Amino acid sequence: MSLYDVIAAGHRGQCFALMARRFMISEPQAALAVRHLLPVLLPSFEAWISAPGGLASFLEAMERSGYEKALVSPAVLSNHFERDRGLHLLEQFRSVREFDGAAFGQAVAGSGLSYRVLVQMLPYVALFFMGALRTGCEAPLRDVLARRMGSTVKAAANPFAELSQMIAWETKGERHGLLANVLGGLLGNISAARDNRQTVAATSPI
């Protein structure tokens, strides 16, 4: 299942309908906006988890930030605190790699929405993006952790917390970065479920 599909299934399948009401657009336009904004976020996200310490930072964020609620609680779209969390995410992504201006332009053209509306939607799409990753990563990472520990991990165990600690430990040992490479590949495969992504170079519009 792609990130787009996980987001579409959010809020009991009403994610795009809720976005449409929030931004006074049609539901198909909301779906198109998400489909075209994900490729704007993905390269910066991949640069983040590939940077030194980035994967551990991502796992810690998954452990503590409750991003899975972004696809469950309707209050996400009406709460200024949640919007600010989304803006903080965008800043974190951009600190490693700027967003692709041409890809954003393609989002405008592909969605039929204005630049202004897409900029307003982007913080929420960033929250949905992280919520989808939280949902999509948990089971595979639990499997990685179970194999690593040589036993079945209890259902209550938090794979993000355990794995972030293991990464920090391994970077100091002889098997430098082994687990980080395994997890980086896994997360990269999950995030690689792109919809209509085109790689282009341009300056960021935001």
Image (spheres, rainbow, N blue to C red):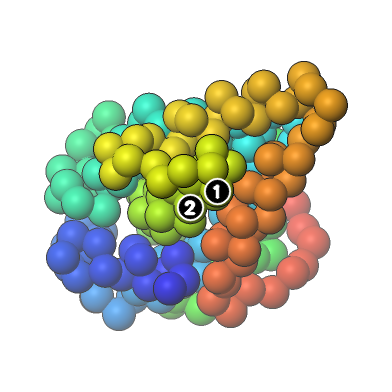
Q: Nearer the viewer, residue 197 or 201?
A: 197
The amino acid at mark 1 is Arg
What separation in Å lies between label 2 and label 1 (alpha carbons)? Answer: 6 Å
- For mark 2, give the secondary structure: helix
Q: Secondary structure at mark 1?
A: helix
Location of residue 52 with respect to 50 vertically, above or below: above
The residue nearer to you, when weighing 170 against 54, is: 170
The residue lying toward the viewer, choosing from 150 and 81, is 150
| Relative side of 193 to 83, left or right | right
Residue annotated with mark 2:
143
Q: Give the image quarter of residue 11.
A: bottom left
Q: Position of residue 7 (x, y in %)?
A: 34, 63
Whether residue 48 appears in this view of the structure is no
Given the image, on which type of amino acid does mark 2 rest? Asp
**Residue at 24 percent of width and 75 percent of height:** 26
Which quarter of the image is occupied by the C terminus?
Answer: top right
Q: Residue at x 19, y 51 (%)?
A: 72
Residue farthest front in this picture: 151
Q: Is residue 118 left or right of residue 175?
A: left
Dot 2: within a 10 Å radius of its alpha carbon, few (fewer than 14), some, or many (20 or more) residues? some
* Residue matched to label 1: 147
Decide: is 127 above or below 95. Answer: below
72 vs 40, nearest the viewer: 72
Q: Position of residue 50 (x, y in %)?
A: 73, 43
